[in-house]
Image (tube, grey):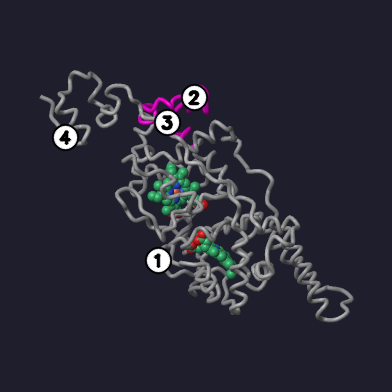
């Protein structure tokens, strides 16, 4: 159980105590209304936005690092075939997902799991649906090297970036005395990712005290979320996640965290609780992209999920009415933030000096200029084989 989890559960116990002890009630109705009102206030205190983004000591924030990471995140030259960037799958226009049930990598290889958002990952601990990486720095190199994703040879990425003059200067600026190295590529990308934080949403304005910021349906949805529907058992705190792993009873074969923690029954079919910030923009839902809409998600929870030993103890058939379902969706819609527009960065240009292109296509060629026949140069530019005379 995480600290956030403990705090939330503590608050739940407090709410129950208030409900039970509501003293000197004039009539049942007034006491009931008062208790709900008090409980709503208590819950609101659990959802206050943090004022700062946490950056780790080993990789503190600098503007130069974040700017460089922004470029790298959008640069397709990070992939083996130079056509897939991190942003191909983590697209800001889809709230940093790809809008697909499951995406495609190198040579259109279908991926096994849906692309999660990178929004608010600064606040997370374990990365991936199954938590197999324990930092953004560690995570960043994974997709670059994965054959099914960006299919990059990590030995050559440093050389490739060094061949782009602009990157040499940018790395020297961000990492004085160190320049382009594999760990620094990861540090720059991770620093950029930590700046990707969801914008202030109507929900935040309401939490901060503006009663007009969200409608009555959403307020009722918030009460349901924290009480009858029990969503808060896992989607707790301002980022609406406990950053932990649960089996919510989806019926595919993927065992998720079970592959990492093989002997723990409750970790079989368990996946990381995703943030619900900006969730309307990220359909379809779940690690397998199997639920197309928020209404489908609510219906799934209403049914209680597939019964099996690993199913979370917090999953139960909810027996929600149609109005209650609509209220929960109205609540989730208020989490859509007024996010800053993300600029697509201008990337450092390829080296345009004579033979530079040729060197990239075939590192051995072009070095001596005159050694390669004109025919071979043309052949190589079109990536056709050519045996020099
Ligand atoms: C081809 C699509 C694709 C590309 C390209 C890609 N990713 Fe991902 N990303 C995914 C998928 C799919 C997952 C989830 C995989 C899993 O959990 O097994 C993921 C997971 C992540 C996560 C974990 C998020 C979380 O909440 O746990 C981060 C962070 C991330 N990617 C960053 C990056 C970075 C940085 C790059 C570029 C270096 C990148 N991704 C390139 C598809 C992609
Ligand atoms: C037992 C913990 C738990 C409870 C209770 C729970 N969730 Fe979830 N939620 C999760 C996990 C874990 C996932 C990801 C599951 C997966 O992909 O396999 C998830 C996924 C979601 C998603 C999809 C997000 C995305 O980006 O794919 C939404 C929306 C959601 N939950 C809303 C709710 C609502 C609304 C409730 C209450 C009715 C609720 N959850 C109750 C743990 C929980």
Q: Is residue 46 left or right of residue 32?
A: left
CB atoms at circles 2 and 4 under 8 Å apart? no
Q: Is residue 45 magenta?
A: no
CB atoms at circles 3 and 1 under 8 Å apart? no
Give neighbour class at mark 2: few <14, some 14-19, many 20+ (Cα, 10 Å): some
Q: Which residues are magenta?
A: 160-186
The residue carrying mark 2 is 172
Q: Percent from the top left, x then y, of residue 79?
A: 36, 41
The residue carrying mark 3 is 348
Q: What element does badge 1 sit on?
A: loop
Instruction: Kindly identify which numbered label has been placed on residue 253.
Output: 1
Q: What element does badge 3 sit on?
A: loop
Q: Disc 4 or disc 1, which is closer to the eye?
A: 4
Instruction: Please tell me in which quadrant of the rendered image residue 85 appears.
Output: top left
Give neighbour class at mark 4: few <14, some 14-19, many 20+ (Cα, 10 Å): few
Q: What element does badge 2 sit on?
A: helix
Which residue is located at x 49 percent, y 37 percent? Answer: 69
Q: Is residue 176 magenta?
A: yes
Q: Main secondary structure of the magenta part?
A: helix
Q: Nearer the viewer, residue 217 or 182?
A: 217
Q: What element does badge 4 sit on?
A: loop
Q: Disc 1 or disc 2, which is closer to the eye?
A: 2
Q: Percent from the top left, x then y, of residue 261?
A: 48, 57
Choose the circle earlier in sequence order: 3 or 2: 2
The residue carrying mark 4 is 385
Q: Disc 3 or disc 4, which is closer to the eye?
A: 3
Distance between the Cα atoms at labels 3 and 2? 14 Å
CB atoms at circles 3 and 2 under 8 Å apart? no
């Amino acid at each position: 159980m995480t600290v956030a989890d403990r705090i939330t559960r503590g608050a739940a116990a407090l709410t129950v105590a208030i409900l039970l002890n509501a003293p000197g009630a004039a009539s049942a109705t007034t006491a009931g209304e008062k208790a709900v009102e008090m409980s709503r206030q208590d819950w609101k205190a659990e959802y206050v936005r943090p004022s700062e983004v946490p950056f780790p000591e080993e990789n503190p924030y600098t503007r130069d690092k974040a700017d460089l990471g922004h470029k790298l995140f959008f640069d397709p030259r990070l992939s083996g075939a130079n056509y897939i960037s991190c942003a191909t799958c983590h697209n800001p226009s889809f709230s940093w997902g790809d809008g697909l049930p499951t995406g495609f990598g190198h040579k259109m290889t279908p991926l096994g799991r849906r692309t999660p958002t990178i929004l608010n990952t600064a606040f997370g601990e374990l990365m991936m649906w199954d938590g197999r990486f324990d930092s953004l720095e560690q995570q960043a190199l994974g997709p670059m090297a994965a054959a099914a994703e960006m299919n990059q040879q990590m030995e050559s990425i440093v050389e490739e970036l060094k061949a782009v003059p602009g990157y040499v200067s940018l790395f020297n600026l961000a990492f004085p005395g160190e320049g382009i190295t594999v760990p620094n590529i990861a540090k720059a990308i991770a620093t950029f990712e930590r700046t990707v934080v969801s914008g202030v949403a109507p929900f935040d304005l309401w939490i901060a005290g503006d009663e007009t910021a969200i409608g009555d349906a959403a307020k009722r949805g918030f009460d349901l979320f924290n009480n009858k529907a029990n969503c808060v058992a896992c989607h707790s705190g301002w980022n609406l996640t406990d950053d932990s792993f649960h089996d919510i009873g989806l019926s595919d074969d993927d065992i998720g965290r079970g592959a990492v923690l093989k002997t723990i029954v409750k970790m079989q079919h368990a996946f990381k609780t995703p943030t619900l910030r900006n969730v309307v923009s990220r359909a379809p839902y779940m690690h397998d992209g199997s639920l197309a809409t928020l209404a489908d998600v609510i219906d799934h929870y209403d049914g209680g999920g597939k019964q099996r030993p690993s199913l979370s103890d917090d999953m139960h058939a909810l027996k929600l009415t149609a109005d209650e379902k609509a209220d929960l969706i109205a609540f989730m819609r208020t989490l859509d933030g007024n996010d800053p527009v993300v600029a697509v960065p201008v990337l450092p240009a390829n080296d345009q000096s004579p033979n530079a292109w040729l060197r990239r296509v075939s590192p051995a060629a072009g070095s001596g200029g005159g050694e390669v026949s004109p025919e071979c140069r043309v052949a190589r530019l079109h990536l056709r084989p050519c045996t020099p005379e």
